Image (cartoon, rainbow, N blue to C red):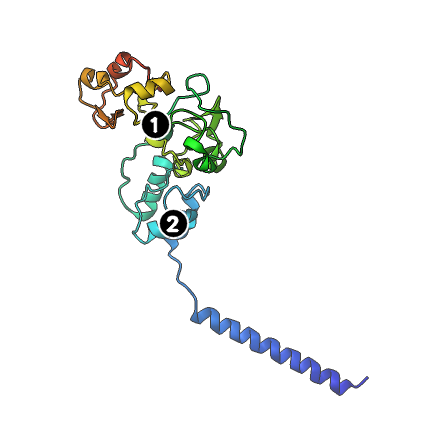
Amino acid sequence: MNIAGVVIAMAIVGGIGLFIGLFLGIAAIKFSVNVDEREAAVLDALPGNNCGGCGFPGCSGLAAAIAGGKAPVNACPVGGEEVGKVIAQIMGVEAEETVRKVAFVECQGDCDKTTVDFEYFGVKDCRMLAFVPNGGPKSCNYGCLGGGDCVAVCPFDAIHVVNGVALVDKEACKACGKCVEACPKDLIKLIPYDARYAVACSSKDKGKDTTKSCTVGCIGCQICKKNCPSEAVDIIDFNATIDYDKCTECGACMEKCPKKAILNRA
């Protein structure tokens, strides 16, 4: 064995290693990014679900936005007011009052309450049903299709299809908004958690047509609107809506609704 050759090889390998080490060290210094300590603290305070309900790419994206003043301290829908207060302390600002929200499906047209135009045996996918005649088997073109797209995207197991219509468990819901985006019928809305009454129908058909397709559909009769003492109910496109900023939860709208399209969520 040639000792000189071994020594030379070791020297070359050592030299290359030294060069790479120096190069990486210089690169680390030159391209280093100063991390805001508050950003790291905010990230630790966030729940870590990475659901995207805040509108940013995961919790790290939200933490950077909050630290950079591009998002409010209470922007996390999952953490809610409690996490918002912790982040407010980190950022040295006043914690803003927040209203907890939950998803609500504006339809109660299950298999027992709606009529169908045909039997469907295809893929259970709400978006695919857009290519099916009449937009699906149910006679109501505005009702829940029951395909479960909303169920598939919910990271909290808070929504399930029961008897052909999606239902939300408001205790499990974190208002991330993924089900809202997934519903091709735009049936799911985020409403205040404490809202006692809600209109469980999205039909824009005239009353006569709605009655033919669903026994609990809103017919736009305006009885709820006329009996609301706080003027919180309005009729838009033959469908009742509730302004929760005005609603006093008297229950008159629900009691007077002839179709029981307004639910008591208490």
Q: Which comes sooner in the sequence, label 2 or label 1? A: 2
Q: Which residue is mark 1?
A: 193
> 106 or 9, which lies in front?
106
- Classed neighbour count for the residue bearing mark 2: other residues with Cα under 10 Å, few (<14), some (14–19), many (≥20): many
Horizontal placement of 137 versus 64: left or right? right
Where, quadrant-wise, is the N terminus in this rendering?
Answer: bottom right
Amino acid type of the residue that numbered disc 1 sits on in the rendered structure:
Tyr
Task: Locate residue 231, reporting x and y percent.
Answer: 18, 22
Amino acid type of the residue that numbered disc 2 sits on in the rendered structure:
Ala
Q: Nearer the viewer, mark 2 or mark 1?
A: 1
Distance Cα–Cα, label 2 vs label 1: 25 Å
- State the mark number for residue 156: none
The residue depicted at 29 percent of the width and 47 percent of the height is 92
The residue depicted at 39 percent of the width and 62 percent of the height is 34
The residue depicted at 29 percent of the width and 12 percent of the height is 258
Horizontal placement of 102 versus 207: left or right? right
Task: Locate residue 229, reporting x and y percent.
Answer: 17, 17
Task: Locate residue 193, reporting x and y percent.
Answer: 34, 27
Q: Which residue is mark 2?
A: 63
Badge 2 element: helix
> 194 or 95, which lies in front?
194
> 141 or 225, which lies in front?
141
- Classed neighbour count for the residue bearing mark 1: other residues with Cα under 10 Å, few (<14), some (14–19), many (≥20): some
Image vertical order of residue 220 relative to residue 256, above or below: below
Give the image quarter of residue 248. Answer: top left
